[in-house]
Image: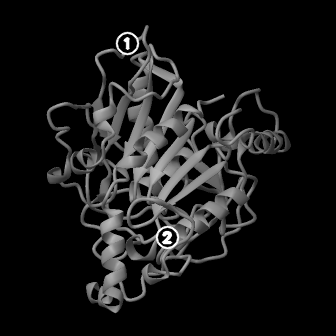
Amino acid sequence: MKGILGDSRLPALIALGLLAACSGSQDPGTDPGTDPSRLTQNIPVTRRACTPFGNPPRPLQAENALFHPTCLLTGKRLTDYTDAEGTPRQACLFEPAAAAPDHKLPLVVFIHPSIAGPDIAGTATEIRLKLDSADLTGDPNRPGFILLEPAGRVTERYYPVPDQGDSPGWDNWYRQLASGPRTVNGQSYPENVDAATIDHFIAEEVATGKVDEKRIYVMGWSNGSAMGILYALNRPNIAAAAVYSAPDPLAAFNDPCEQTPVAGPPKDDTELQLLNPGLPIFHIHNSCDIAGLCPNGLRLQSRLTAAGVPFKGLILDNRKQPTDACEAICGTDPNATPAGLADPTGYLTNLPGYTLGTLNHLTWPYSYTDSMFEFLREHPRP
């Protein structure tokens, strides 16, 4: 596969094929993520509070209709879907008039940040404004894309104040993302309900025949970027991901069950096998980011690269210009450990750094939206 990353996806795909061959017979083209029974069935658990897939599912705090998206005036709210925990789930669809079975368009799945749902987050980027014009195919006769914006749930989160819950978000701490339940150590672990919800709404739109299935992409912001990375790294139908300001979905802040990403079978619960490790990822983040997040973004890049993931990173300074380093005043801990940030007064320990980082984090990188689209365009699914 050619493009910005050259052929860097090939080694990971070969490794995945060798893994499948070693774990039993498998039909050509079948990814182990589509058949949980073919994956490792014994993973030693070394931490009492953890599972083979990180934390237990994060507790639902409320099913609050106040947080349901309206999809504003230009979007269509899809029929609600009830997830495996009994929670009604919503999604917004923005579809160009040109989309049709005989004029298939790419599908972009935008995963909103925590606290802000699709209505707020979707209008704070320029993604919707490019619905009819963005080039995600390289074909001048097929401009535009279909945009899907699923909505998260109100659950507890391992984030600093004020983002510990009580608002919509995504559970990237329970990481069983095989399609359907998976039995490990004799116990059945259900699929992450957020992942299953995204699956449902993607499948619903694909069923219309309007989607170019080689070009299903993920974009996201903040907690939505973390969930987007985790989701896309475990879904072989996702071609590529381009995200903004992502905490590491496997190790950030005060996560008690952090894991190291690996392409092969995990040695124990401290590792997580990626089911789509050949996924190309473009991650844009700030040199001064919220709660000291920049060093965590650099470590995310090194950890995924070590697992064979084709990864492109871009750091932006306070003027949204490219730079090559994080700003020490805004945090130096690779885990972005929130020193004192469990209490709002903890921000007073470094008010300038946390203020600047928060402002940067809450500002979408408008000058680089087209660069994100370009990255996606150059990485269709092989």
In this view, the residue in front, 362 or 267, is 362
Separation (CA) of disc 2 from disc 1: 41 Å
Q: Amino acid at mark 2?
A: Cys
* Residue at image location 58% in from the left, 61% down from the top: 53
* Residue at image location 61% in from the left, 30% down from the top: 381
First in residue order: circle 2 vs circle 1 = 1
Q: Examine the rendered structure and indicate whether residue 231 appears above or below residue 271.
A: above
In this view, the residue in front, 168 or 319, is 319
* Residue at image location 49% in from the left, 21% down from the top: 212
Q: Amino acid at mark 1?
A: Ala
Q: How is the image coloured?
A: one colour
Where in the figure is residue 247, as x and y percent of width and height?
Answer: 47, 64
Q: Quick one: label 2, few (<14), some, or many (20+) residues within 10 Å?
A: many
The residue that disc 1 covers is 100
Q: Examine the rendered structure and indicate whether residue 231 appears above or below residue 294.
A: above
Mark 2, secondary structure of its residue: helix
The residue that disc 2 covers is 294
Placement of the N terminus among the 4 image quadrants: top right
Picture quadrant where residue 206 is located: top left
Where in the figure is residue 171, as x and y percent of width and height?
Answer: 42, 58
Where in the figure is residue 335, as x and y percent of width and height?
Answer: 54, 76
Placement of the C terminus among the 4 image quadrants: top right
Where in the figure is residue 22, as x and y percent of width and height?
Answer: 85, 44
Viewed as shown, does residue 321 lie left or right of 297? left
